[in-house]
Image: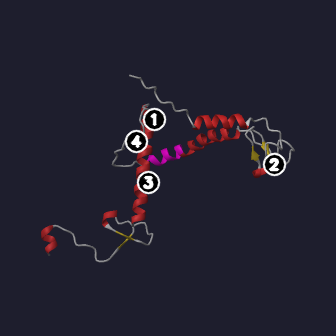
Amino acid sequence: MDHDKTGCQAPPEGPILCINNCGFFGSAATLSMCSKCHKDMMLKQEQAKLVASSIGNIMNGSSSSSGNEPVVATSVDVSVNSVESKIISAQPLVASGSDESDEAKPKDGPKRCSNCNKRVGLTGFNCRCGNLFCSEHRYSDKHNCPFDYRTAARDAIAKANPTVKAEKLVKI
């Protein structure tokens, strides 16, 4: 009787099952759904809002939107499902464009030693001269390497140890 005077409704007598019949309990705060079903529903609504706004931008011709702007919408129309199916059918066309660039790469053959032409696979050694060698020919004296190690070492030392000169003192 106190509820009639205040206008409040009495709480339900037992726990409420999720309206999606997933077997979990729902609450009034999540629209009588369990937390997982409520989160899924919210994600679907956000995706539908984004799709509707992007289609609206495309139709209006304004392609300058950065996509970071918040979208404010209160209801989702039934026509969004048809828009989603059109976008899904357009996605493979975009993906096929990126696959073509991967196919344009020439496929390398088996890696071989530059000196004896032996297959080296993953165990090949790259020399500073730019060639690939097997374990027998990996050292510079074994494959007559044209790379000048002495000059490269001198340059590295000179770069690592710059000359330090103090300013000359003016004599009084």
**Residue 71 lies within the magenta run:** no
Q: Distance between the residues labelled 3 and 4?
A: 18 Å
Q: Which residue is drawn at 40% across and 56% down?
A: 42
Question: Regarding mark 2 in the picture, which secondary structure is present there?
Answer: loop
The residue wearing badge 3 is: 44
The residue wearing badge 1 is: 58
Extreme front residue here? 172
The residue wearing badge 2 is: 134
Q: How far apart are marks 4 and 2 (CA)?
A: 53 Å
- Under mark 3, the amino acid is Lys
Above or below, 93 relative to 22:
above
- For residue 137, side relative to residue 11 (left or right): right
- For residue 98, side relative to residue 23 (left or right): right
> Which of pointers 1 and 2 indicates the residue nearer the eye?
2
Seen from the viewer's position, the closer of residues 81 and 164 is 164
| Cβ atoms under marks 3 and 1 closer than 8 Å | no
Q: How far apart are marks 3 and 1 (CA)?
A: 21 Å
The residue wearing badge 4 is: 68
- Under mark 2, the amino acid is Cys
Q: How crowded is mark 2: few (under 14 residues within 10 Å), some or many (20 or more)?
A: many
Q: Residue at x 39, y 49 (%)?
A: 76
**Residue 82 lies within the magenta run:** yes
